[in-house]
Image (cartoon, coloured by chain):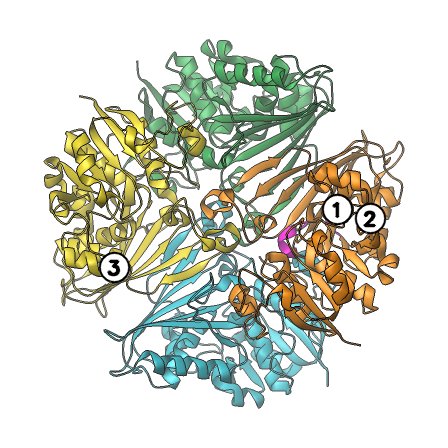
Chain colours: A green, B orange, C yellow, D cyan
Amino acid sequence: MSVSVSIIGGSGYGGGELLRLLLGHPYAEVKQVTSRSHLGEYVYQVHPNLRKRTTLKFCAPEQIEPVDVLFLALPHGQTQHKIAEYAALAGKIIDLSADFRLKDMQAYQHWYGTAHAAPEWPAKFVYGLPELHRAELAAAHYVSGVGCNATAVNLALLPLLQAHLIEADAPILAEIKVGSSEGGAEGNAGSLHAERANVIRTFSAFGHRHTAEVMQEMGVSQVSLTVSAVDLVRGVLATVHAQVKSGVNSKDCWKAYRTAAAENPFVRLVKEQRGIYRVPEPKILAGSNYADLGFELDESNGHIVSMCAIDNLMKGAAGSAVQCFNLMQGYPEDCGLEFTGLHPY
Amino acid sequence: MSVSVSIIGGSGYGGGELLRLLLGHPYAEVKQVTSRSHLGEYVYQVHPNLRKRTTLKFCAPEQIEPVDVLFLALPHGQTQHKIAEYAALAGKIIDLSADFRLKDMQAYQHWYGTAHAAPEWPAKFVYGLPELHRAELAAAHYVSGVGCNATAVNLALLPLLQAHLIEADAPILAEIKVGSSEGGAEGNAGSLHAERANVIRTFSAFGHRHTAEVMQEMGVSQVSLTVSAVDLVRGVLATVHAQVKSGVNSKDCWKAYRTAAAENPFVRLVKEQRGIYRVPEPKILAGSNYADLGFELDESNGHIVSMCAIDNLMKGAAGSAVQCFNLMQGYPEDCGLEFTGLHPY
Amino acid sequence: MSVSVSIIGGSGYGGGELLRLLLGHPYAEVKQVTSRSHLGEYVYQVHPNLRKRTTLKFCAPEQIEPVDVLFLALPHGQTQHKIAEYAALAGKIIDLSADFRLKDMQAYQHWYGTAHAAPEWPAKFVYGLPELHRAELAAAHYVSGVGCNATAVNLALLPLLQAHLIEADAPILAEIKVGSSEGGAEGNAGSLHAERANVIRTFSAFGHRHTAEVMQEMGVSQVSLTVSAVDLVRGVLATVHAQVKSGVNSKDCWKAYRTAAAENPFVRLVKEQRGIYRVPEPKILAGSNYADLGFELDESNGHIVSMCAIDNLMKGAAGSAVQCFNLMQGYPEDCGLEFTGLHPY
Amino acid sequence: MSVSVSIIGGSGYGGGELLRLLLGHPYAEVKQVTSRSHLGEYVYQVHPNLRKRTTLKFCAPEQIEPVDVLFLALPHGQTQHKIAEYAALAGKIIDLSADFRLKDMQAYQHWYGTAHAAPEWPAKFVYGLPELHRAELAAAHYVSGVGCNATAVNLALLPLLQAHLIEADAPILAEIKVGSSEGGAEGNAGSLHAERANVIRTFSAFGHRHTAEVMQEMGVSQVSLTVSAVDLVRGVLATVHAQVKSGVNSKDCWKAYRTAAAENPFVRLVKEQRGIYRVPEPKILAGSNYADLGFELDESNGHIVSMCAIDNLMKGAAGSAVQCFNLMQGYPEDCGLEFTGLHPY
């Protein structure tokens, strides 16, 4: 039942998280992992949490051998140039980058500012969010990853759209707060601790690329994402504002969110009247694959605030990828994804 | 030119900040400061930054003697029961609490859930935001403080409303991110470091009390405040979403914000094309009285994102109070408020 | 092969971590968990990471039924008064408190300031650090927990003492930096986020109670612990200064540390010449049971700096307790303790 | 009474802090400030706290014109190559780098690994710690800056050595915890927020270069500095362990520390029996020039723990430099250094 897997691009944060998950996965045998910048180094020298868990060393992409499932975790824009090569190495591919998420090549050009290098390929990929494409994923050979911010918004909208509580063409405003690991292991001047600590920085008022994934996947047309950096390493909280249809009340919402939580093993509804943790919070999700949802409906005017908290490296990247892997392989959906997050954190 | 001042309620965060400012103010002579819970202790035992700056001890409220200007920094709901007593002690009063901010007693009852105990008093108070009431403050005897979140929203809206770029009755959505000092020195279970660290917690989806101050002061009717706690001690960022009137372009906005910055010594416009600090950020404002404003206008649809960053204990509380004090006394508006904030922080 | 377990005192941080581990343990069936302050609440309302993992509710201690193994996670000083009652409920007991760690009742009185209420009991308990008592634990019925700071120091000293590289009666200075979760879920005024954030606070210059555990377990006589709070939730780093015996060189040290890492599944040696993670760091250990060791020897004068990083709630409390449970039951030593920590964090 | 000043190297953290202080200094007129990497940019684009405080732009070092006092804030190792040029521009120079701190050129070579390029110059510089060289500074033309970690240790030792409570040749162990701004505005891979957040990293077990400054200035021969990074931007706490002479008791220590605090305007003694702030803590010193001292003496064995907290960019760099400037010019010692730090922070 086990399969061999390799990872292209293993020294970044997404790749490191994939490694952690796949090394602990009962049915995955990790064969090779690449990194040009850390060639020849032990994997645990870059990802120190993996010490005593593996003696793998980083190899060059050229050294990758055929394998059952190939995970790609390269920076955006690279994979599309090599996808044919990779497809020759493995019958199944899961790509964490943005290269194969968008199906409409005009939309790709609009949001990424350049024509796609392999425009025939995106259509072959299933968008890797199991909560939207569970059945397709079971039959998929090629799966794209998901944008972390897009995922938080998509899952915040999921109960509302599936239960038809909001109109798809109504204005939706998503206010997203994100941790520093979204910036990646390379970082930039603003990622320096002394600059990034204590920060509340609305670095993208609108026009964030993940908007395209929300439009494509949720079928909404008037959605805007505003993204602010806050002082946290892992975590995204999307606070999404929308207008429910006339007549929709709290009970309808409760039912919609409960349904979403019941149908999806990694979706939970958090809406408590007491205690410290009454609403979804990313801090308790670090390392876990859960997406915690919550909502508040102002019945006086129909304003609904839907919240979704995730760990951007898990449910927003590597965790969803492994969940897709499980679906593709017919393993239990939560296989290798059992870690529940920490309290306190 | 100097005046004597005393502070009722000096052991909280707002009171401590007042103390810091007034002890360094060239024209204020701090006579007495009260605290029931720290009675008899040196002020610097509670506010350790004031060591070597004062040998004052906390006294009881009953011991307060007549003084030129009395600052009140008690928890909300207490001052209204004693305002007549306080007024007998000082010809001028500046109250940091919420007790005299709202002029409409029905609104007060609606937002604070109880009838006001001294309904004839609020009308005597000028709302203490100099950017809105500079002239009135110069003649005022009684000045109320401002809500910190309300101030961030009010100043974010100021250029847009003063230049008539948005309609007062259009929907406005303010997404506010706040530090832990807003919770006060008493705190609650959720304020414990192990629970509050690393947090992104949308604790108020709508219905925050400061909404009433925004409605009253800006004359807007459809405004909603959403407040999220993030990991920071001092600071508020309001990211305010609105719709500009048809035909309004970026140039109009630049002009409106520049005008606000030119007319108000503590308002700055932050809108850079390069560097790390391109947008308003509260982190560099800790201890300063500045309100940093910025904006992004999506000319394709009229969606404007207006940002205002402040230190909640300064421009959002004690700093504005001292600014009002300066105006009331005819001192230079920035007297005692010269500290510029730190970089890095 | 499975056993039933219950937890007395499940709403604190140690109890919550025990719950997390035991709910995920393949051979433990969690029957009951108590909390007086959260009686009747769902466990996941207090420990929100456990939502969807359990529908247990907190019960009262009086409701606890007989069980195979009873875990006690009460505040220090309480268990000793009820130990006979608890022993009647379960054949095996693992107590996380300090009540049964010290074997010398005079030492107990000296360090805890009061006579022990059940002085015949401590001798029945094995000190629950597997790295020191693996064989005894396999046969134990009663196991005491470990002090988190003591554990970091004990493991930092372990290679040096086992390889006889330092004298047991030489002066040893342990400088310990700790996160806020050590303060417990109750906290105190200094635990408030606004006071505890950004902190470096040497709150115990010497005389910390855990000193007694180091003296007892390592047989050292002149050891001093200095403890400083830093801004982190989970984690302890002990930086221990000692003098190696004349003639001891780096090679001897390498051998000693490598031996310790080889003999103990949860001990790792971290001593890299490149990369970011060259020394032990608690941040990557959050949620994991590893103790990462490192050292630097100044061969010019024999000054050795031995470092040990742990998660105080895991290896310093609940993790070691479950490791003891595994040894007592004959399960694999790392059963239920597989989580490897996160990078980045 | 005013003088003209310029700054070579104004885009780093030390240079930025100098700018902040000198722009607010009543007797300093800032003429020019250089930065190669930010040539032509407004100073406030790099140091956003200075917006509305100056319209200066960064110029090139070659453009610097003659001036009364020249401040140098270049990275270590650069100034020594140009000191003659700089001396031709100004009669008085204050250099923040390490180039002219050490007087013994063999020691310089030992600690910095290279021969000094201008060995005749260090002797002309007074070491810029007013608490040690107040009288000399009043007559000095050339003043060197101080190492931040060295300053924390030197001031922790000051009362003990000046009162002859410890022997100068006894072993002294300084455990130093530092914030991220010590790493400078350039940073390195380990300075990235996602790696540096939540950190406790003993990056220098011994052999830190600042050891040489402690030996030179305090005349101690057996001192070792251990430096650990913690999660904070500004601040250093030195926890220094030493052995008092036989017969020394707590009263002697109190007297020594009180004397140091009385003789030095920026030294405070913090030793409280109640409240949250009982010991020196850097967090409340951010932006201030204070050095807070404290101690605990174990009378049973003579072990003294002396603590000193400072802001590394202030008392550990730019603050001390401005204090020296005041002494050199005959201004009040605290001129321009009045900011008292914030509570809470």
> Does residue A259 show up magenta in the picture?
no
Q: Where in the figure is residue C261, as x and y percent of width and height?
A: 21, 45
Dots 1 and 3: beta carbons under 8 Å? no
Amino acid beneath label 3 = Gly
**Crowdedness of circle 1 by 10 Å Cα count: few (<14), some, many (20+)?**
many
Residue B279 drawn above or below residue D63: above
**Crowdedness of circle 2 by 10 Å Cα count: few (<14), some, many (20+)?**
many
Calculate the distance from the C-alpha at mark 2 to the C-alpha at mark 3.
65 Å
Label 2 element class: helix
Per the picture, the main secondary structure of the magenta-coloured stretch is: loop
Same subunit: marks 1 and 3:
no
Span of residues in magenta: B269-286
Same subunit: marks 2 and 3:
no
> Does residue B279 show up magenta in the picture?
yes
Label 3 element class: loop
Nearer-N-terminus badge (2/1): 2
In the rendered image, the quadrant that contains the C terminus of chain B is bottom right
Residue A203 left/right relative to D207: right
Dots 2 and 1: beta carbons under 8 Å? yes
Calculate the distance from the C-alpha at mark 2 to the C-alpha at mark 1.
8 Å
What mark, if any, has residue B294 been given in the picture? 1
Q: Which residue is mark 3?
A: C113
Would you say residue B334 is visible in this rendering? no
Residue A318 drawn above or below residue C236: above
Would you say residue A102 is visible in this rendering? yes
Label 1 element class: strand
In-front residue for pair A26/B123: B123
What mark, if any, has residue B257 been given in the picture? 2
Amino acid beneath label 2 = Tyr
Q: Where in the figure is residue C265, as x and y percent of width and height?
A: 21, 39
